[in-house]
Image (cartoon, helix red, strand yellow):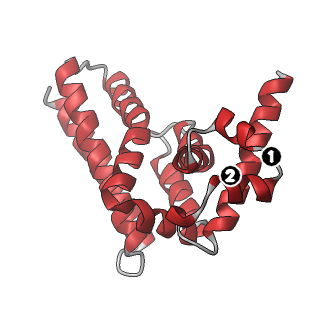
């Protein structure tokens, strides 16, 4: 247990260094040397935990946002989960935009889609259980892909254009769309 706590703390220290570096330069210009020098670990320690800067970035985003959202009872707490994600984006606006500028829309969307997979599967399975219905596996996988693409695309659009797309409106439309579409799908299956 002690090793896992130490490992987690080391990762958090490196993530803090990455955040600090992102305040002054784009992701593509940040080096492993800068990270290890700032946080006082050696190169071997960095590579023990992460393959590269992008792996550290992915871990940081997952640790701070996506993994926490996975713990919500999403079907009952859509608004709470969406609020959390939007709060995270607001609090880390500069970093998220640096990431977007460094890796581009498609890569950021792919990142979000991958991490949204388990969340979407949970939403669908909870809806099935609640409706006492079972979708066939092929259709369930289609729905998972559909909602992953939709949610990741909407999240990125909102990240890039928050002034035009009001937070409350995005939350309301997302909640309404997921609830009503899943209810309709399950009622007609």
The structure residue drawn at horizontal position 44% and vertical position 70%, both measured from the top left corner, is: 167
Check the image and name the residue furthest to the bottom. 163
Residue 176 location in percent, x, y? Answer: 31, 53
Check the image and name the residue furthest to the left. 188
The structure residue drawn at horizontal position 41% and vertical position 41%, both measured from the top left corner, is: 116
- Mark 1 in CB contact with mark 2 (< 8 angstroms): no
Distance (Cα) linking label 1 and label 2: 12 Å
Q: Quadrant of residue 106?
A: bottom left
Instruction: Report crowding for label 1: few under 14, some 14 to 19, many 20 or more residues within 10 A (C-alpha).
Output: some
The label nearer to you, 1 versus 2, is: 1
Residue 141 location in percent, x, y? Answer: 24, 28
- Vertical side of 97 occupied by 56: above or below: above
Q: Is residue 166 visible?
A: yes
Q: Quadrant of residue 34?
A: bottom right
Q: Secondary structure at mark 1?
A: loop
Q: Secondary structure at mark 2?
A: helix
- Vertical side of 26 occupied by 114: above or below: above
Which residue is the site of mark 1? Answer: 41
Q: Is residue 168 visible?
A: no
Q: Quadrant of the N terminus?
A: top right
Residue 110 location in percent, x, y? Answer: 34, 47
Earlier in the chain: of badge 1 and badge 2, it is 2
On screen, residue 119 versus residue 109, left or right, reads right
The structure residue drawn at horizontal position 82% and vertical position 25%, both measured from the top left corner, is: 3
Which residue is the site of mark 2? Answer: 15
Most foreground residue, 47 or 172? 47
On screen, residue 162 versus residue 183, left or right, reads right
């Amino acid at each position: 247990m002690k090793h896992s706590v130490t490992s987690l703390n080391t990762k958090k220290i490196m993530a803090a260094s990455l955040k600090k570096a992102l305040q002054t330069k784009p992701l593509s210009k940040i080096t492993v040397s800068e990270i290890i020098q700032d946080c006082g670990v050696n190169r071997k320690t960095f590579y023990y935990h992460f393959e590269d800067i992008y792996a550290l970035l992915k871990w940081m985003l997952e640790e701070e946002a996506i993994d926490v959202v996975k713990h919500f009872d999403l079907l009952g707490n859509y608004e709470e989960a969406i609020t959390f994600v939007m709060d995270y984006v607001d609090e880390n606006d500069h970093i998220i935009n640096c990431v977007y500028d460094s890796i581009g829309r498609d890569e950021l969307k792919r990142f979000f889609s991958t991490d949204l997979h388990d969340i979407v599967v949970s939403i669908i399975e909870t809806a099935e259980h609640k409706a006492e219905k079972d979708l066939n596996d092929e259709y369930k996988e289609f729905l998972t892909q559909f909602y992953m693409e939709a949610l990741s695309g909407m999240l990125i659009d909102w990240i890039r254009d928050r002034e035009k797309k009001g937070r409350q409106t995005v939350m309301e439309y997302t909640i309404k769309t997921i609830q009503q579409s899943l209810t309709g799908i399950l009622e007609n299956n």
